[in-house]
Image: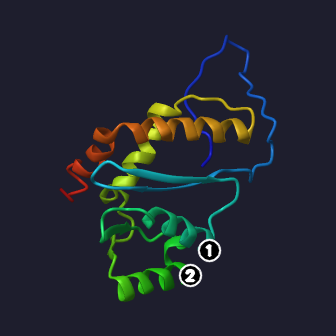
Amino acid sequence: MCPPRGSTYALKGQTPVLEVADSKHYAHLSVSVHITSEGALNYEVRSSSFNGVAMVRFLKKTFTGRKRKKHLMIWDRATIHTCQAVKDFLEQEAANQQRVWLEVLPPYSPELNPTELLWAYLKKHKLANMACKTLQELRQKTIVALEDIKEDKQLIKAFFKHPKVGLM
């Protein structure tokens, strides 16, 4: 997750400059979320990319303690979702405990994924025009924003009720 960019202004002839401490172009946050149509939100924020092992750990943490016996997973075709470790975990869950019902979205159709609406809301409303100087500051603000969204169950439910999502 890179900081969202917005418009700015400056006096004529003076170019605005944003100084950052983490100047490495590859520095980023990785965020994974799991939302439910009942308004629950689980997330994990990492300073490194998610690999198959990390994604399986996140999924296990998400399923632990859930009242629901079956989980509908709406899965886009992101590379991390199709890696072997995740495939093996989901197949095991489906076969042994029959807890996972996987709905794979068609390619290039983010408008069908309610999680994409969450990302848009996060970037356009909670983190809009935020200028973080460090990756740690972005991490903290992202966690605060996700915690705010987590408290608003009606908002999370609304992501599933959007006309293009078509789940409800």
Residue 52 position (above or below residue 140): below
Q: Amino acid at mark 1?
A: Val
164 or 140: nearer the viewer: 140
Residue 85 position (above or below residue 157): below
Q: Which residue matches tag 2? A: 85
Q: Which residue matches tag 1? A: 53
Q: Does residue 18 appear to the left or right of 66 in the view shown?
A: right
Q: Residue farthest to the top?
A: 11
The residue at 79%/41% (across/down) is 22
The residue at 72%/14% (across/down) is 13
Going from N to C along the chain, the mark reached first, 2 or 1, is 1
Residue 44 position (above or below residue 142): below
Whether residue 4 is visible, yes or no, is no
How far apart in space, not on screen, are marks 2 and 1 (Cα)?
A: 6 Å
Q: Does residue 51 appear to the left or right of 65 in the view shown?
A: right
Q: Position of residue 3 (x, y in %)?
A: 62, 40
The crowd level at tag 1 (other Cα within 10 Å; few <14, some 14-19, many 20+) is some
Query: How many numbered marks does the figure carry?
Result: 2
The residue at 24%/48% (across/down) is 162
Label 1 sits on a secondary structure element that is helix
Q: Position of residue 168 (x, y in %)?
A: 18, 56
154 or 119: nearer the viewer: 154
115 or 6: nearer the viewer: 115
Q: Amino acid at mark 2?
A: Ala
Q: What's the image's color scheme?
A: rainbow
The residue at 49%/81% (across/down) is 89
Whether residue 52 is visible, yes or no, is yes
Q: Are marks 2 and 1 in contact (CB under 8 Å)?
A: yes
Residue 98 position (above or below residue 2): below
Label 2 sits on a secondary structure element that is helix
